[in-house]
Image (spheres, coloured by chain):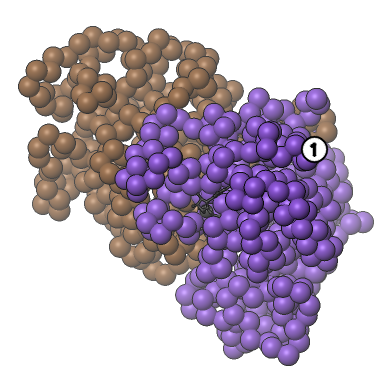
């Protein structure tokens, strides 16, 4: 096999309805790949015994909060880490319960791949649709649909085929290029790390082998140079009296020493003098590196400004059409001046209009009901107090995303996608 | 390595942590780094030095001294602050006890671990710190696995794990009311092995306690504890010379050592890679109950 993924990092998330077996699957994945420490396993065995269970309940490996263990559900996303000789993984195990959808979005927002679980007995339910749609909205390009609890349907191929064709039908309206299907039993381990002996009709690989092999590196945008300035470094010490460095993380594109750049919003031109990672000078920088850039000319930039290339610039938008995934317990209130946090800027905004809401089951637009409440996905037009330097979210996850903050409570009430 | 514009995973973790640290400096008025003297807070400090180079780290190191610290930890702390030219603020648990703000625990399980929380919250209030950066990692413990990068604390310093703010992408919302503060965890996504690999790669200096050395110890309930004046003996306990090292450094009355011959970073990394017990497996404080970390974190513990 190729070794291109060696030492690379895959961030993935679980998704699907409550009780479909997400946490159990993660527990099983960790257990069968021997990534669980003895004291952790012992603690899980003790807790399982206390609950009167015969076997270790592997979901307790991620359901770490008292309330989660008492109720047997996941409430907030848990992050777990494991490595095989072929790859490193960061897992976000998210809750299926509709009330905690915001935590699912949290876990999925930094993922390269999502595993959607579907209970083989129940097939697609509303949360399957919602989570798949959110994954698509987030621009997750790789989906693994695990039809779980195959042990409860006698490992029957027809049950599996019915669900996969229903999902294919639904997902044709989503924007996810790579979708893979695997029949599993998270409880017993079939097709998770070890191939199942009970489903000879399935000819594909196991979940783990797929996770090890899937290639996500090409998902990054190396074309459009965007460097949002996060912090200005001015040491004002004797050794570095005139140093003025612009610190930030490359959002997209490749910056090289000597490159001509334009600073936005001022439009002033300069060229890259030096690039540092810490104290070390480097020749070039690319996403997701955190670097410090100095410029040849003495122009004054601050947080929120952006370095780009002359012939490839983001839009400067004050009137913005965007999808919102609403998370606030209170619904969208058109009278509130929500704060938009976008990249390294924060600016007041006004929601001018709700254009439509998305019906999560049919993916149709609903233009009649414009009350946006918790867990709704809506398309809105908003106006900001000053222009945002933005790209379409599909092209650029960093410059195309924003959050809305309620100025009264400081809570994050929505995730926004410029499109 | 960077031929195809791929970062290896340590570079990716480093970039993420530097981003978080810079975001703290930009969003908050009075941030601080909570410096325990352990390897994780040493790595955080190293990352901060990188994030703000060639300037000095624009925030103080705050250390909560239980009065039961290893001497090596304190010497290391002072030398590091001096070398980096950063301000050092020390909150003293002894002073909190002397002021009658807390009462020293007594009995066989006595420890100052929990008392630290009061001193910590007092120190935060006195310094008016609005963001406290810690070295905790999600892989340490199941309640920590739930942490955000920016973790909100109410005006009593408490964590509410059932109502955490959603944290989308890398858009951190540090907005808060006066009196509230944030705990920030730049190392959230690092594992213990990542930390050791990174320390080796970056040649980061560590207190000698992390390396195998000969020391008088007592073995209590299967945990190897360093012999010291702060650790009253129980009946039948006699200190014995052992070859040990520490995986974490906390209050010396609760931090278990492990028997080990690993006296170089390479040997330690190899040992960590092969180990089957978590690093907090040796911490008496975590064993008090199934959710003791969550309970302490809710109160405002590190
Ligand atoms: N028979 C069988 N039971 C399973 C399987 N996978 C999970 N379960 C059971 O289904 C129940 C729910 O599993 P969890 O892993 O907690 O489900 P979840 O998707 O994480 O639920 P939330 O996080 O609350 O949304 C538990 O009782 C599991 O033991 C499976 O493959 N077969
Ligand atoms: Mg779960």
Residue holding disc 1: A203
- Residue A397 visible at all: no
The residue at the point 68 percent across, 33 percent down is A197
- Choose top left, top right, bottom left or bottom right for residue A263: bottom right
Q: Position of residue A84 (x, y in %)?
A: 63, 28
The residue at the point 59 percent across, 38 percent down is A189
The chain drawn in purple is A
The residue at the point 45 percent across, 24 percent down is B276
Q: Nearer the viewer, residue B78 or A51?
A: A51
Q: Position of residue A28 (x, y in %)?
A: 55, 39
Residue B48 versus residue B279 in the image, above or below:
below
The residue at the point 76 percent across, 68 percent down is A418
Residue, far right: A311
- Choose top left, top right, bottom left or bottom right for residue A18: bottom right
Considering the image in quadrants, where does the N terminus of chain B appear?
top right
Q: Nearer the viewer, residue A16 or B140?
A: A16
The chain drawn in brown is B
Q: Is mark 1 within 8 Å of ligand 1?
A: no
Side of B149 relative to A6 (left or right): left
Task: Judge the density around disc 1: few (<14), some (14-19), many (≥20) Cα neighbours within 10 Å.
Answer: few
Residue A14 versus residue B220 in the image, above or below:
below
Q: Nearer the viewer, residue A73 or B95?
A: A73
Residue, far left: B235
């Amino acid at each position: 096999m190729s070794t291109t993924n060696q030492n690379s990092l895959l961030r993935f998330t679980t998704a699907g309805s409550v009780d479909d077996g997400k946490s159990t699957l993660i527990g099983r994945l960790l257990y069968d790949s021997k990534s669980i420490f003895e004291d952790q396993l012992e603690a899980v065995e003790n807790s399982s015994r206390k609950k009167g269970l015969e076997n270790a309940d592997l979901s307790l490996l991620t359901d770490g909060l008292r309330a989660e263990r008492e109720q047997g559900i996941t409430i907030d996303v848990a992050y777990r880490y494991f490595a095989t000789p072929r790859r490193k993984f960061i897992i976000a195990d998210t809750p299926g319960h509709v009330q905690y959808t915001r935590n699912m979005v949290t876990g999925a927002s930094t993922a390269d791949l999502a595993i959607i679980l579907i209970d083989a007995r129940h097939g697609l339910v509303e949360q399957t649709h919602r989570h798949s749609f959110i994954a698509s909205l987030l621009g997750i390009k790789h989906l693994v649909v695990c039809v779980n609890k195959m042990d409860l349907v006698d490992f029957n191929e027809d049950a599996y085929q019915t669900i996969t064709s229903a999902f294919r039908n639904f997902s044709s309206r989503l924007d996810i290029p790579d979708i893979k299907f695997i029949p599993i039993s998270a409880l017993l381990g079939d097709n998770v790390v070890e191939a199942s002996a009970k489903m000879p009709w399935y000819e594909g690989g196991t979940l783990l082998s797929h996770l090890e092999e899937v290639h996500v590196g090409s998902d990054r945008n190396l074309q459009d140079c965007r460097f949002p300035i996060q912090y200005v470094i001015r040491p004002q010490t004797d050794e570095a009296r005139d140093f003025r460095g612009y610190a930030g993380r490359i959002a997209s594109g490749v910056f090289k020493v000597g490159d001509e750049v334009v600073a936005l919003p001022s439009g002033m031109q300069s060229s890259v003098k030096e690039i540092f990672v810490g104290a070390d000078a480097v020749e070039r920088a690319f996403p997701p590196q955190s670097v410090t850039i100095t410029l040849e000319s003495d122009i004054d930039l601050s947080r929120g400004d952006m370095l780009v290339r002359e012939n490839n610039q983001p839009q400067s938008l004050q009137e913005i059409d965007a999808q919102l995934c609403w998370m606030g317990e209170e619904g969208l209130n058109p009278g509130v001046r929500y704060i938009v946090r976008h990249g390294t800027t924060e600016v007041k905004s006004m929601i001018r209009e709700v254009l439509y809401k998305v019906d999560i089951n049919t993916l149709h637009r609903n233009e009649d009901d414009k009350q946006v409440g918790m867990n709704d996905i809506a398309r809105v037009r908003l106006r900001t107090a000053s222009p945002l330097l933005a790209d379409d979210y599909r092209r650029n996850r960093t410059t195309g995303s924003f959050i809305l903050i309620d100025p009264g409570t400081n809570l994050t009430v929505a995730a926004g996608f410029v499109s | 390595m960077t031929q195809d514009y791929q970062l290896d995973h340590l570079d990716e973790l480093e970039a993420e942590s530097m981003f978080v640290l810079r975001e703290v400096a930009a969003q908050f008025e009075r941030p601080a780094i909570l410096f325990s003297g352990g390897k994780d807070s040493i790595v955080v400090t190293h990352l901060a030095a990188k994030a703000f180079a060639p300037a000095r780290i624009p925030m103080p190191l705050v250390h909560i001294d239980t009065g039961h610290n290893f001497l090596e930890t304190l010497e290391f702390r002072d030398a590091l602050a001096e070398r980096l030219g950063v301000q050092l603020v020390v909150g003293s648990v002894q002073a909190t006890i002397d002021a009658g703000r807390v009462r020293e625990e007594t009995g066989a399980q006595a420890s100052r671990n929990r008392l630290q929380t009061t001193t910590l919250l007092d120190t935060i209030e006195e310094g008016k710190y609005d963001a406290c950066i810690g070295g905790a990692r999600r892989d340490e413990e199941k309640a920590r696995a739930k942490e955000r990068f920016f973790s909100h604390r109410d005006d009593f310093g408490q964590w509410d794990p059932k109502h955490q703010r959603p944290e989308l992408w890398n858009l951190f919302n540090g907005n808060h009311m006066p009196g509230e503060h944030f705990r920030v965890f730049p190392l959230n996504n690092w594992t213990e092995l990542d930390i050791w690999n990174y320390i080796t790669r970056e040649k980061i200096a560590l207190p000698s306690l992390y390396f195998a050395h000969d020391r008088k110890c007592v073995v209590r309930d299967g945990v190897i504890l360093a012999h010291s004046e702060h650790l009253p003996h129980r009946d039948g306990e006699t200190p014995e010379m052992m070859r040990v090292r520490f995986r974490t450094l906390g209050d010396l009355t609760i931090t278990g050592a492990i028997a080990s011959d690993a006296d170089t970073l390479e040997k330690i990394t190899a040992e960590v890679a092969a180990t089957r017990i978590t690093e907090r497996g040796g911490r008496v404080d975590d064993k008090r109950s199934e959710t003791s970390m969550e309970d302490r974190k809710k109160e405002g513990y590190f």
